[in-house]
Every structure is written in C-alpha cells, then in structure tokens.
Amino acid sequence: MAKTYIFAAGDTLSRIAKAQLGDAKLAASLADFNGLPDANQIMVGQAIQLPSARDLKPSTAPLPRAAAWPVAPSGFQGVRDCFGDILQFIGADGNIDPRWEASRIVRQVLPFAIPLAWDTSKSASGIRCHKLLAPLFEEVFRQIVARGLQSAVKTYGGGYQFRAKRSGVKPSTHSWGIAIDLNPNTNAMGTAGDMDPRLVELFEGLGFVWGGRWAGRGKDPMHFQYCTGY
C-alpha cells in the first residue's frame, strides 16, 4: 500500500505529492495519511509513508449502510473525528490508557466459532470492536451465515488491538476496533493470498476496504477496515 520516502533538502509535501503521486493538491491528504499536524513542519531525514494516489483519495461511490452505524470516514483525521481521538489516550510510555478500551471497545458475539490463527485448537466466539461498529460486524457475520460462507472463514487473525501499522508508525485501524483480519495463514502481507472473492464482495458491499487491493509490499489480503485513505 505504501512505500517509505525520506525528506531531502528542498523537499516540500507539495513537491513530493506532485513528483510521486502526480498531483500537488494531494499534499494535505499526504500529511493527514502520515499523521502530520502541520504539513509545513518537515525536516531533512524525516521518513513518511507514500501510498498510491488512489489509496489517498476517499471513495466517491455511495456505500450501502444502515442508520445503526456511521458512514466510513476517510483519512487519519476522519477516523479520529468519527471513532475518537486515540492520540489523547496514548501515554508518554507509548501505552494506551485503559479508559480508551473501557469507553469505546465492546465484545460482539459471533454466530459461529472461528479457529484462532495462532492456535487452531482454540476458537473465537466473539470479536472486540468499536461500539459504533458492533451492529455492522453483527450484520457482516449474519450475511456470512445467510450466504453459506462459513467455510470461507477459516481462521481469525484479530480485531481490536492497540498497535502501530505494520507499514508505518501511526496507529493501526485495529487500534480503533474498526478492522478485522481473517485467514492470515494463507493471506500474508505482501502476497496475493487466497481470500474467497465472495467474502471480499460481502465486506466491500458493506463499506469496508479490503487490503488485498493495495499494492506492493503493503498488500494485505487478510485485512478489512472500515475507512478509506488510511
């Protein structure tokens, strides 16, 4: 999904956006993608992540949704506005304040058990997710059952988990409980994977972004997240 770029003397985000993404107007989105509070405060030697121009732009297609859950936000600031400013809960030691989980994360019961990817002798009977998306995850798994796709969900790789993105330093979408990983043993990052296209269609039809559509080493076919441009 993204590659690393190191600032050189004379660089600005506008120049980088123009040279690397083909559009100087994407500078603000690039700053947001990297969690930079001020696009003008950059230093020589500073590293940022460069996604594709397509990944930076929010989706313009109307997404089906129910009043029970919010519209998928776009960008770092959009995620914080919708699901909470997690930066206010990260301590100086890098750990998350327990009040973050207590106020936002809930457990959503699953209609069928899913073997854990890291220990298939055990299974998950529920997932932890953001409270605003509990009805959405309930609908996802209701549809999986209704469409007879339980066998396509082989293992569970995780839902809510406070951590940085594997391709960067800003919080992963898992940190808000708005992402889920499925079948990770055969859908490793950077590979094409073997995710059932019917599952992809289901998730995308409900507004999720599938990491299998990302490019390069950031391609992440196990990953589904409820936001764009992140």
Image: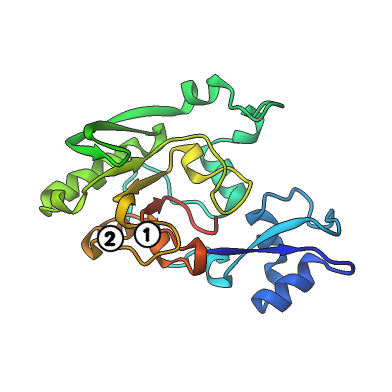
Q: Which residue is at a point 63% across and 56% down the rendered structure image?
A: 33
Give how far across and how far down residue 11 sits, in percent. 84, 68
Q: Could you tell whether 94 is left or right of 196 in the image?
A: right
Quarter-of-image position of residue 108: top left
Is 153 rendered above or below residue 1?
A: above
Looking at the rendered structure, which numbered label has been put on residue 195?
2
Q: Which residue is at a point 53% across and 45% down the rendered structure image?
A: 172
Q: Nearer the viewer, residue 120 or 169?
A: 120
Figure colour scheme: rainbow
* Disc 2 residue crowd, few under 14, some 14–19, many 20+, Cα 10 Å: many
Q: Secondary structure at mark 2?
A: loop
Inspect the image, locate mark 1, and give the three-letter code of the amino acid beneath it: Pro
Q: Residue furthest right?
A: 9
Q: How many marks?
A: 2
Q: Secondary structure at mark 1?
A: loop
State whether residue 133 appears in this view: yes
Q: Which residue is at a point 51% across and 34% down the rendered structure image?
A: 162
Q: Nearer the viewer, residue 215 or 117?
A: 117
Q: What is the C-alpha distance between the residues marked 1 and 2?
A: 7 Å
Is 102 rendered above or below residue 46?
A: above
Asked whether the residues under the numbered discs 1 and 2 touch, taking CB atoms below 8 Å apart as contact, a structural biologist would say: yes
Quarter-of-image position of residue 5: bottom right
Give how far across and how far down residue 2 sits, in percent. 58, 63
Inspect the image, locate mark 2, and give the three-letter code of the amino acid beneath it: Met
Quarter-of-image position of residue 180: top left
Give how far across and how far down residue 225 sits, in percent. 42, 51
Q: Could you tell whether 128 is left or right of 217 in the image?
A: left
State the quadrant of the C terminus.
bottom right
Give how far across and how far down residue 191 sits, in percent. 40, 64
Which residue is denoted by mark 1 in the rendering?
221
Looking at the rendered structure, which numbered label has been put on residue 188?
none
Q: Earlier in the sequence, mark 1 or mark 2?
A: 2
